[in-house]
Image (cartoon, grey):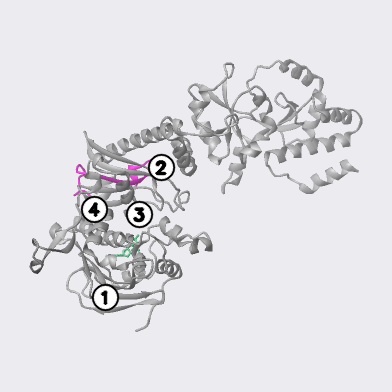
Amino acid sequence: MAKKQFKAESKRLLEMMINSIYSQKEIFLRELISNASDAIDKIYYKALTDDSLSFEKDSYYIKITPNKEARTLTITDTGIGMTKEELESNLGTIAKSGSLAFKNENEMRDGQDIIGQFGVGFYSAFMVADQVSVVTKALGSEEAYLWESKGVDGYTIKTCEKEDIGTEITLKIKENSEDDSYDDYLEEYRLKTIIKKYSDFIRYPIKMDVSSTEGNNKDSEEVTEEVINSMVPIWRKNKSELTDEDYENFYQEKHYGFDKPLKHIHISVDGAVRFQSILYIPEQMPYDYYTKEFEKGLELYSSGVLIMEKCADLLPDYFSFVKGLVDSEDLSLNISREILQHDRQLQLIAKNIKKKIKSQLISLLKEDREKYEKFYQSFGRQLKYGVYSDFGKDKDILEDLLLFYSSKEKKLVTLEEYVSNMKEDQKYIFYASGENNERIEKLPQTELVAEKGYEILYFTDEVDEFAIKMLMSYKDKQFKSVSSGDLGLEDDIDKDVESDSEEYKELFNHMKEILSGKVKDVKISKRLKSHPVCLTTEGEVSIEMEKILQAMPDNQNIKADKVLEINSTHVVFQALIEAFESDQDKLNLYTNLLYNQALLIEGLPIQDPVEFTNDMWKLMA
Ligand code: ADP
Ligand code: MG
């Protein structure tokens, strides 16, 4: 019989498992038990929608059998089993190949790190075994199959005998090495401890034959079958009975993420609708989070039975990063799944959960700023999308969760903090947009606002300005871009500017003509202090928004109404006046140069770079 090769990615994972220096090899048992439990869930789930199947809870279990003589450990389940094709695709390749997005070879070598990062699954068996065999018979199938592998050089599948539906996985446990005692995994006591630690909440009995010595008489050793796990799902337990570690273990067992959760939320509601829920706020962003592939949702259980793996309706998009489950006895199950999604109970639960997540995030923000900022780093952008989406429907829920970098504090601040730090004469919440903080810091437009001692929020995410446009104001203070036409600052320099403007009207009209189609206006700047020029905008569309809109696939060529502002106290202004009075060509040259410089400052492309460089050397010649 021909040996089959593992798919490339699986092979790499397998290699890592075999050579693993991972200290917690014991988690292989958690993985195999979880798989067994999932397989039983699948039968349970099928029985719900298929009347020809009845689910007798008692006949479903997981059994762990160590055999010291043969050096084997067997995990048996009465789950749904696998067909030949399923064996091939599930154990020959990694199911969630995305979880193996190795970043580089170094990380590969440093196996320890990676293993901690993703749910290791079936292959973790190879951390403790040098041979693994799987005997399985699928529900509805006559044939049983044996899958066997000694590791990287491939696997075989052949038919075999098996009476009952389900799966039996046998590990040939490795010989002890200098560093590791694999004997441990054949010891009843040790196995019991591992099961208790990681799999106590598995809802099906995990059985094991345990020998007990009656009194002191060694001869009367008896073997009895014991159920090792408590079987009470963690969410049904009392919060006070559970430790942080319990919640973390459950998070790992469920493969909710490859990280440690930042926070867990345990909800138990006994009101108009009854439900229990455990929710997690992950620390790290899933690799596909901001892609179309990412699917949000919570696991939905009805009285302890999993009925939906990803119930999207339980989470608003802006909290799509939340992982966890909901269990309710109030869901009507005989109705089809589709109706269930519009179930009134479900909506009540969703509403409740939304509130809870918000309040927990607020308390995280208040109590552990560092953790919150970590969270915000990963998911802040999603919150801002939330402010913006559905025409700002939920902006009130989200506004207090936002953070922006502050020009004054040099760190992230909340809007609340900003407003409470506003100067007495300050009317607006000022912001500046740009690619990153360093660039914004240097924007000429910020000069006047900064000089007045006002704090400026830096917007570096594409969504920021769009979100703020939707928010409009916070605590009755309106947002104002430092680049907007009217800064709303009552200033003593205003008068000067006005008389200057009158005096140089002709010059500006001329420049406007030279730049026709490019800018809407040319005028003297009130906001510039040391820089000669800048671009500002009139109307709703800012320059940053223009950039984003232009980058969209179906862009409607929406442009900002730009205004070229000139600093009348700067030396270049004198040069402009002289050129205007004596040399048309020079005025042309200067105007174009200044305009292009203003574009560069904004990070906008210059329409004709060759012409721009020609203009530069003309100036030098
Ligand atoms: P995951 O559980 O995250 O999908 P695993 O590597 O643990 O990844 O398992 C791969 C797949 O193999 C599972 O998704 C499941 O389809 C199948 N499988 C593993 N163990 C069993 C089992 N005991 N019974 C039925 N199917 C199983
Ligand atoms: Mg698994």
Residues under numbered marks 4 and 1 in contact, where contact means CB atoms less than 8 Å apart: no
Question: Disc 1 versus disc 2: distance between alpha carbons?
Answer: 43 Å
Q: Amino acid at mark 1?
A: Tyr
Q: Residue 127's quadrant in the figure?
A: bottom left
Disc 3 vs disc 2: which is toward the camera? Answer: 3
* Label 4 sits on residue: 200
Distance between mark 3 and mark 2 Cα atoms: 21 Å
Q: CA distance from mark 4 to mark 3?
A: 16 Å
**Residue range of the region highlighted in magenta in the rendering:** 312-335
What is the crowding at mark 1: few (fewer than 14 residues within 10 Å), some, or many (at least 20)?
many
Element marked by disc 4: loop
Judged from the image, the secondary structure of the residue bearing numbered disc 2 is helix
Task: Give the residue drawn at x 81%, y 20%.
Answer: 503
Instruction: Give the residue pinned by disc 3.
Output: 255
Whether pointer 4 and pointer 2 mark residues with C-beta atoms closer than 8 Å, the reply is no
Query: Which label is found at residue 317?
Result: 2
Q: Position of residue 452 (x, y in %)?
A: 65, 22
| Residue corresponding to mark 1 | 145
Going from N to C along the chain, the mark reached first, 4 or 3, is 4
Q: Quadrant of the N terminus?
A: bottom left
Q: Residues within 10 Å of mark 2 (few under 14, many from 20)?
A: some
What kind of residue is marked 2? Asp
**Mark 4 burial class by Cα count in 10 Å: few <14, some 14-19, many 20+:** many
- Between 393 and 72, the residue placed more toward the observer is 72
The answer to whether residue 193 is seen in the rendering is yes
Query: Taking 151 as reference, is 595 above or below it?
Result: above
Question: Looking at mark 3, is its residue's CB closer than 8 Å to ligand 1?
Answer: yes
Could you tell me which residue is drawn at 57 percent across and 30 percent down? 409
Q: CA distance from mark 3 to mark 1?
A: 28 Å
Query: Is residue 482 or residue 124 the one in the foreground?
Result: 124
